[in-house]
Image (cartoon, rainbow, N blue to C red):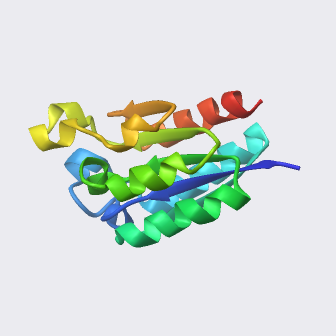
Amino acid sequence: MAKTIHILNGPNLNLLGKRQPEIYGADTLADVEATCAKLGRELGLEVALSQSNHEGEIVEMIHAAREKVEGIIINPAAYTHTSVAILDALNTFEGPVIEVHISNVHRRESFRHHSYVSLRADGVIAGLGVEGYQLALRRMATLLA
């Protein structure tokens, strides 16, 4: 049976491809989902992708993942820099967690340089565009092998 990976996306990523394409590129979240589903199949993984603009809903998704998935890939977006609640939820998850950012947060505003999620993440990928999700999936496959 394939191991399941949950890809969680935070606020405004529903506008991927439309919002600031000079920073985030032209791919939509649906494009990311299709690419990750295809790669997941190649790697023997089942991929579920979710997005929410609401912090509490992301916390609930992480809680649900504790019982259903083997790994989490998370792009918490703006909550990266503000959410102790998401960090606390991730700390209850026993499988691997990989943090992904489409842009290079370290070349942006100084408030983006700190990540609460990184305190829990087993790896962080930033600045490689939406390809970062694919790299995270490949790493997840290695961690779960």
Q: Is residue 108 above or below residue 38?
A: above
Can you name the residue that lies furthest to the left here? 109
63 or 58, nearer to the observer: 63
Quarter of image, res 42: top right
Q: Is residue 127 above or below residue 5?
A: above
109 or 134, nearer to the observer: 109
Quarter of image, res 56: bottom left
Image coords of residue 21 (percent x, y): 25, 53
State left or right for residue 122 relative to residue 139: left
Q: Taking the image as drawn, is residue 109 in sight?
A: no
Quarter of image, res 96: top right
Image coords of residue 123 (percent x, y): 48, 30
State left or right for residue 113 relative to residue 91: left
Image coords of residue 27 (percent x, y): 40, 54
- What is the quadrant of the C terminus in the image? top right
> Which residue is at a point 13% across and 43% down the rendered structure image?
111
State left or right for residue 33 relative to residue 43: left
Can you name the residue that lies furthest to the right here? 1
Q: Taking the image as drawn, is residue 82 in sight?
A: yes
> Which residue is at a point 50% across and 46% down the rendered structure image?
91
The total number of labels drawn is 0
23 or 44, nearer to the observer: 44
Q: Is residue 76 above or below residue 136?
A: below
> Which residue is at a point 32% across and 43% down the rendered structure image?
116
Image coords of residue 141 (percent x, y): 69, 34
